[in-house]
Image (cartoon, grey):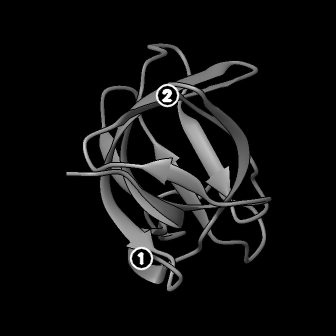
Amino acid sequence: MKPAVCREFTVEITVENEEHQAVFNENYVPVIISESIRQVCNWVVKDDQTNDKKKHPKLLDKKKSIVIQPGQARLITFKFKYFAEYLIEGQKIVIDDNCVKCVGTIRKIMYDTLRT
């Protein structure tokens, strides 16, 4: 499969730290690292990906959040903030942010309409 330009993609992500859980709020903007790509991404909020306050009472406000426990895999959709990049399904990504380290695999790519 050839790489194609895309801005939005879904990643199956796992937290590597055994001490810390990862909390992705709707305004969280991590740097996605994959091979030669290093770019800030926005989390695309989808209701089927968010956590319920009943399950996680520590969540604040009405913000949508995802809580990922160590070793747990979750699907999260990201969108590149500045420009499109070349990606392929199965490509590995890393998020190394302060005390949270996550690794993941790209599962679905939403290709740009300008694809040729």
Three-letter amino acid code of the residue under disc 1 = Thr
The residue lying furthest to the left in this view is: 1
- Residue at the (37%, 64%) spot, across then down: 109
From the viewer's perspective, tell me whether residue 54 is left or right of residue 62: left
The residue mark sitting in front, 2 or 1, is: 1
Q: Locate residue 51, reporting x and y percent.
A: 47, 65
- Viewer-proximal residue, 9 or 16? 9
The residue lying furthest to the front in this view is: 116
Quadrant of the rendered image containing residue 110: bottom left
Three-letter amino acid code of the residue under disc 2 = Cys
Q: Locate residue 73, reporting x and y percent.
A: 30, 41
- Residue at the (75%, 62%) spot, across then down: 60
* Quadrant where the image shows the C terminus: bottom left
The numbered mark, 2 or 1, whose residue comes first in the sequence reads: 2
- Find disc 1 in the rendering and name its residue: 116
- Viewer-proximal residue, 52 or 109? 109
Compared to 79, does 48 lie above or below?
Answer: below
- Residue at the (41%, 35%) spot, across then down: 69
From the viewer's perspective, tell me whether residue 35 is left or right of residue 14: right
- Viewer-proximal residue, 64 or 59? 64
The residue lying furthest to the bottom in this view is: 113
Circle 2 sits in a helix, a strand or a loop, which is it?
Answer: strand
- Viewer-proximal residue, 60 or 16? 16
Res. 102 mark? 2
